[in-house]
Amino acid sequence: MTKPGPAATSQSEVRGLPSLDRCRVMGVVNVTPDSFSDGGAFSDTHSAVEHGLALAAAGADIVDVGGESTRPGAARIDADEERRRVEPVVSALAAAGVVVSIDTMRASTAAAALEAGASVVNDVSGGRADPQLPPLVAEAGVPYVVMHWRAHSAEMQQHADYADVVRDVCDELRERVDDVVAAGVDPAHLIVDPGLGFAKTPEHNWALLTRLDELLALGRPLLVGASRKSFLGTLLADDAGPRPTAGRDDATAALTVVAALAGAWGVRVHDVRANADAVRVVARLRAESVGATA
């Protein structure tokens, strides 16, 4: 089981982002008609912008805007459509003072979003889907989330084969970090993400969450994205079947506490308020613990 990490671990800094003394909260805005988490509720610009502003008001430190669904089995969209979806949303949120992350695997989309005001690139492929993306990030000098990834959504679950999922994910993330640094990305800009649900079974996800200390030992700030994922629906199933996505937010907040206690740099979530409260509770407990031992 993951042991609570030192207080300093959760305060790991990423160059280019505000300094905080707690786990960060990244709120999700899916500008897609086929998201698993919200059923396309924010697929038009107006509703997506309003949702992003609401997430920021609820306590999101970063708002992550994506225009392409990466749910299991999702088909890819073309680059023009992805840019059409995200550019006006990024522009409006950035203009309102929101710290915006662009969730994309494409260099062309990332470039457009950075031009529109995004200040973070969140690449679920870890630089594997588009080899031009790491050099673009390097040139832009912005924070870069590198996720563990083995294949596109349509076929990723065919690649959920591991000797030891935690060891294998750590080894593959280490390789990705080395590769993007070789492409010019500043190590101080890097954040790693184990990719829960991406080429992972529920058992794999639970193993990774249980052994977050091994992921933290990679030496990079860690982002955990468990929000509303199907393994939580399976855990909370009843006679009617898996718990629907909207009913998984309490379990997500529980995992946020686990991640924050372990020393994660951030959590990526759909329902921000409860998770923002959770990370602040953990930070207060840490401060009290440090004071008691001083």
Image (spheres, grey):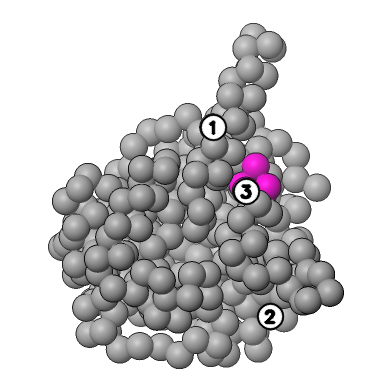
Using the numbered discs, state the Cα–Cα distance from disc 3 to disc 2 in whole angstroms. 26 Å
Residue at the disc numbered 3:
253
- Amino acid type of disc 1? Arg
Q: Residues within 10 Å of mark 1 (few under 14, many from 20)?
A: some
Disc 1 secondary structure class: helix
Nearer the observer, 31 or 123: 31
Disc 2 secondary structure class: loop
Counting residues from the start of the chain, the first of labels 2 and 1 encountered is 2
Span highlighted in magenta in the image: 253-257
Q: Residues within 10 Å of mark 2 (few under 14, many from 20)?
A: some
- Where is residue 65? Give x, y as percent: 34, 64
- Where is residue 226? Give x, y as percent: 60, 60
Residue at the disc numbered 2:
160
Using the numbered discs, state the Cα–Cα distance from disc 3 to disc 1 in whole angstroms. 12 Å
Image-based side of 141 in relation to 28, left or right: left
* Mark 3 vs 2: CB contact within 8 A: no
Disc 3 secondary structure class: helix
Magenta run includes residue 134 = no
- For the point 42% across and 32% down, the residue is 20
288 vs 62: above or below? above
103 vs 70: above or below? above
- For the point 50% across and 65% down, the residue is 147
Nearer the observer: mark 2 or 1; the answer is 1
Residue 237 appears in view: yes
* Mark 3 vs 1: CB contact within 8 A: no
Residue at the disc numbered 1:
280
Q: In the displayed image of the protein, which residue is found farthest to the right?
A: 239
- Amino acid type of disc 2? Ala
Counting residues from the start of the chain, the first of labels 3 and 2 encountered is 2
